[in-house]
Amino acid sequence: MRKPKQRKPLNDLSRSLATLDANHTLIAVIEMGQKSWLVAGIVPGVERQPLKKLDTDENALLKLFERWRMEAEKTGHKIKRITVAFEAGRDGFWLARWLRERGIEAHVIHASSVAVSREHRRAKTDRLDTEQLKRAFLGWLRGERDHCKMVAIPTLAEEDGKRPNRERESLVGDQGRIVNRMKAALARLGIRNFNPKLKKAAERLGGLRTPEDEPIPPNTLAELHRDMERRRLVIDQIRQIEDARLERLKQAPKDGPNVMVRLLARVIGVGIETADMLVQEVLSRNLRDRRAVARYAGLTGSPDPATLGCDVA
């Protein structure tokens, strides 16, 4: 009886599915900083493993790869593949997209997926970090599991689509911090039964009295008024984001993610905000990664057991 074929995962970023030809592949990793990049390479035919510090200049990086390619070809190793990896971080995905447009295979390593030493006083330098990245990336290129996991690289439009949800989330957090700051300022004066979120809260501030039957001191009163103005501005900005989302859904109801948003919004208890967040943050990137969706829904443990020892954007 013929055994059923095992279906390969459609979005398996925990290992490479391409065969590694070490004699014809230039491998590089980048430790990215705000002011400089440290690039470590494995060049076929070259015994030393080069390490080069560059300014944050993508063109200089391209010239470095070309120089390493020429060094390999001088030793008789024709370079057929250049593959580069760096950790996901502040710089995002623009460099990976830029390199791919120029024929270089670029990968972004999930920052928390690289196993690190648990020693309390382990040494940490950029040079050691590149060595660690090289070991993890080599294992991934060989197709071995549990070395590291790559992040799916979104398009510029996909990245931009996430901005409204993330900005709104940040503004909601700002609103909560402002309210907590106002409550703390009032609590220092012994005033605990006042809600600064009320519509007429600003008008009522002047009539508040402390337990000592004193009005709110002038500097504290001015601070509270500024915080209320700031909160009103934040609320207006949240409303602008929500209105823009509704307008976008109205103008293009059948455009890509908007269809999924409208479909999810029909589910009882799921509003437009939650539906849009699910589509932009979960389903658009991880539609084929069932474990990631299950983790988000709380159906499986977090982090993913398959990436423990390695193991998100």
Image (cartoon, rainbow, N blue to C red):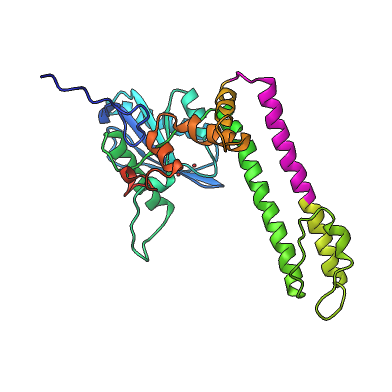
Q: Residue furthest front?
A: 268
Work out whether 166 lies above or below 153: below
Classify the position of the N terminus by image quarter: top left
Q: Quadrant of residue 236?
A: top right
- Outermost residue, left direction? 1
Residue 39 visible in this rendered orientation of the protein: no
Which residue range is magenta in the image? 232-255
Residue 258, horizontal then vertical, whole percent: 59, 25
Q: Is residue 189 magenta?
A: no
Q: Residue at x 72, y 57 (%)?
A: 178
Instruction: Left or right? Give the position of 196 relative to 34.
Output: right
Q: Position of residue 37 (x, y in %)?
A: 49, 44
Q: Quadrant of residue 286?
A: top left
Whether residue 258 sits left or right of residue 101 in the image: it is right
What residue is rendered at 62% in x and 38% in y? Answer: 165
Q: What percent of the width, then of the height, locates residue 239?
A: 74, 39
Q: Position of residue 93 (x, y in %)?
A: 52, 35
Q: How many marks?
A: 0
In the rendered image, the vertical position of residue 77 relative to residue 87, given as above or below: above
Residue 303 visible to the viewer: yes
Q: Nearer the viewer, residue 88 or 29?
A: 88
Q: Is residue 233 magenta?
A: yes
| The quarter of the displayed image where residue 27 is located | top left
In-front residue for pair 7/204: 204
Viewer-nearest residue: 130 or 291: 291
